[in-house]
Amino acid sequence: MTTTTTAPAETATLALRDVTYRYPGTDRDVLRGISASFTSGAVHTIVGKSGSGKSTLLSLIAGLDTAGSGEVAFNGTSLAAADRDRYRARDIGVVFQGFNLVTNASAVQNIVLSMNISGSPVKDKAEHAYALLERLGISREDATRPVLKLSGGQQQRVGIARALSHDPAVIIADEPTGALDEKTEEAILGIFTHLAHVENRCVIIVTHSKRVTQIADVVLGIKSGKIGVVGGHR
Ligand SMILES: Nc1ncnc2c1ncn2[C@@H]1O[C@H](COP(=O)(O)OP(=O)(O)OP(=O)(O)O)[C@@H](O)[C@H]1O
């Protein structure tokens, strides 16, 4: 990431209090009364075996699903009482493992499309997209080529730029480096660290990668429906 930065994001806290979750039609709680908090300025990783409930937890944090009992609160307001469409469009940015880009469209078009969907008030959306992409190391020339013609690392930079397009306080990522080689993973992790430590965003990454957990400020582990701090630098 270049050294140009935006103003630090506002301080945000996401808090889970005694959250339980069970998929409809099943008889088992995937999450069993979990409590945790996620703060601005820190990289948090969530680890756990396959099927332990990591993606389920991310979808509750992203406001895509609601807890069976307990509360997920953003800056003190329960998501159950909040306008979740607005929360998703303004406060949270999501980065996916498979990038989830429209591959025959350009990076700029992908970002403008996302800004249109989230109702962004920015007037010159293309210019905003070019500037974001440039901060993430994507040149104007690469920004106008079909995404399919970019490397995996470049595509993930575009995915991150898209997640940042509405300047969210919280960035969540599900296995964002799973499809990348080690060197590219390192570059992408540098971006996430910058977003937390320099831009004061709250970064939450679900991962199986040891390297991602090594750079985390807080490592949370999920096991048997429970969550706890299992490592990190804080
Ligand atoms: N739509 C669904 N309906 C019923 N059960 C589900 C559904 N989605 C997930 N599950 C179950 O919930 C549990 C937690 O799934 P989840 O995807 O959150 O795990 P995970 O830790 O993210 O796994 P992985 O590391 O493999 O991605 C698993 O037992 C899974 O089979």
Image (cartoon, helix red, strand yellow):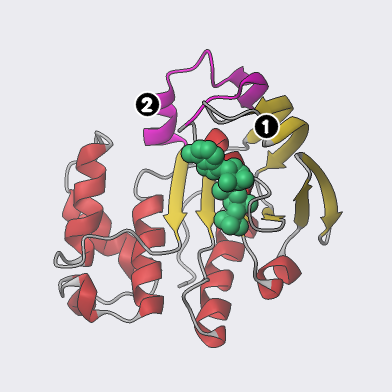
**Closer to the eye: label 2 or 1:** 1
Q: Is residue 169 visible?
A: no
Q: Residue 99 sits in which quadrant?
A: bottom left
Mark 2 residue type:
Asp
| In this picture, residue 164 sits left or right of residue 37 | left
The residue under label 2 is: 85
Q: Amino acid at mark 1?
A: Arg
Helix, strand or loop at label 2? It is helix
For the point 33% across and 81% down, which residue is it?
A: 151
Q: Earlier in the sequence, mark 2 or mark 1?
A: 1
Mark 1 CB lies closer than 8 A to ligand 1: yes
Residue at the location (68% across, 49% down)? 52
Q: Is disc 2 in contact with disc 1, using a CB cutoff of under 8 Å?
A: no
- Vertical comparison of 14 with 162: above or below: above
The quarter in which the C terminus is drawn is bottom right
Judged left or right of residue 46, residue 111 is left
Q: Is residue 60 left or right of residue 99?
A: right
Query: Relative to residue 17, is residue 1 depicted above or below?
Result: below
Q: Which mark is residue 28?
A: 1
Q: Give the camera-side residue of 128 and 151.
A: 151
| Residue 32 in picture, x, y percent from top left | 75, 31
Q: Position of residue 8 (x, y in %)?
A: 55, 48
Classify 65 as above or below 132.
above
Nearer to the camera, 136 or 186: 186
List x then y, in percent, for residue 114: 25, 47
Q: Residue furthest top?
A: 81
The residue lying at 32 percent from left, 74 percent from top is 138
Magenta span of residues: 65-91
Q: Position of residue 9 (x, y in %)?
A: 54, 44
